[in-house]
Image (spheres, helix red, strand yellow):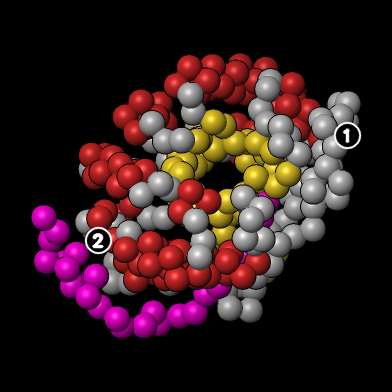
Amino acid sequence: MATPIACAACRSDEPLPFQFTMAFQPIIDLTSSRVWAYEALVRGPEGQSAMSVLSQVNDDNRYRFDQACRVRAIELAARLFGPEDGVRLSINFMPKAVYEPAACIRASLDAARRVGFARDRIMFEFTEGEKFADPDHVKRILSEYKRHGFVTALDDFGAGYAGLNLLADLQTDLIKIDMCLIRDIDSSFARQTIVRGVLGIARALKVEVIAEGIETLAEFDTLRAMGITLFQGYLFAKPLFEGLPAVIKSFSRPGPAGSLPRVA
């Protein structure tokens, strides 16, 4: 049963005391020769940094902010994405802002229905970097999201408190390997060994892997050689304010080392 706080939060229509919007960054897929998804990243109304917005989020407005982020991302995606191209929208959410999973997903469902954006094209990410007081609550959230056909992902894998435990307990559809393990992986035997281990676990569990934070060709080549096919990072495109950034056109199959893929 939802707590009184949850009920009050769900009923409140008080506007947020600040404004925000979204920028979009692509996740590319080497196997399909296409952009696989765009992640919605919060920005200020004139393109200010995410931190300028997140620094204004507190216990009193966290629920409203989380709900408003989902709706804003879905509305913008419906305007920017092709209706039949199958490209996904990735949305970050705050588990601490979800009081009752079945109730708190309603705004997302209503927004997707209103703008005609298919549920199976929406991926919800939550970060490993946050310590959860109630892991069972996160399980209930993910179970509810999967029940509605949403894709789920564990973000920042390898950067936080209990990545392997979370993966064992939650079994998200994807994990995103954090940039702390990606950075300079081409010259780090330790990072290469750890990422190979993560890939082996993920494959055994049938969990897909995204490498995020790619900045150099050497990092990309190393990870591609390990068999990773989903990539995100400044090497391919920086987030674009309320738009879809240009990615190299005419996507080719994976090329030789030292070359970028070409994205349609």
Q: Nearer the viewer, residue 91 or 97?
A: 91
> In the rendering, which numbered label is found on residue 39?
none
Horizontal placement of 111 versus 131: left or right? right
Q: Nearer the viewer, residue 256 or 258?
A: 256
Q: Comparing marks 1 and 2, which lies closer to the viewer?
A: 2
* Vertical comparison of 31 with 104: above or below: above
The number of numbered badges drawn on the structure is 2
Q: Residues within 10 Å of mark 2 (few under 14, many from 20)?
A: some
Stretch of the chain drawn in magenta? 1-26
- Determine the CA span between mark 1 and mark 2: 47 Å
* Vertical comparison of 61 with 163: above or below: below
Q: Residues within 10 Å of mark 1 (few under 14, many from 20)?
A: few
The quarter of the image holding the N terminus is: bottom left
Identified by mark 1, the residue type is Ser
> In the rendering, which numbered label is found on residue 259?
1
| Residue 207, x across and y down, in percent | 49, 28
Q: Nearer the viewer, residue 160 or 238?
A: 238
Mark earlier in primary sequence (1, 2): 2
Q: Are marks 1 and 2 in contact (CB under 8 Å)?
A: no
* Vertical comparison of 231 with 94: above or below: above
* Vertical comparison of 124 with 191: above or below: below
- Identify which residue is drawn at 76% across, 39% down: 33
Query: Which quadrant of the view contains residue 110?
Result: bottom left
> In the rendering, which numbered label is found on residue 103?
2
Task: Examine the rendering and report whether any part of residue 43 can be seen.
Answer: no
Helix, strand or loop at mark 2 = helix
| Residue 196, x across and y down, in percent | 60, 18
| Residue 157, x across and y down, in percent | 49, 35
- Identify which residue is drawn at 55% across, 72% down: 21
- Identify which residue is drawn at 61% across, 70% down: 79
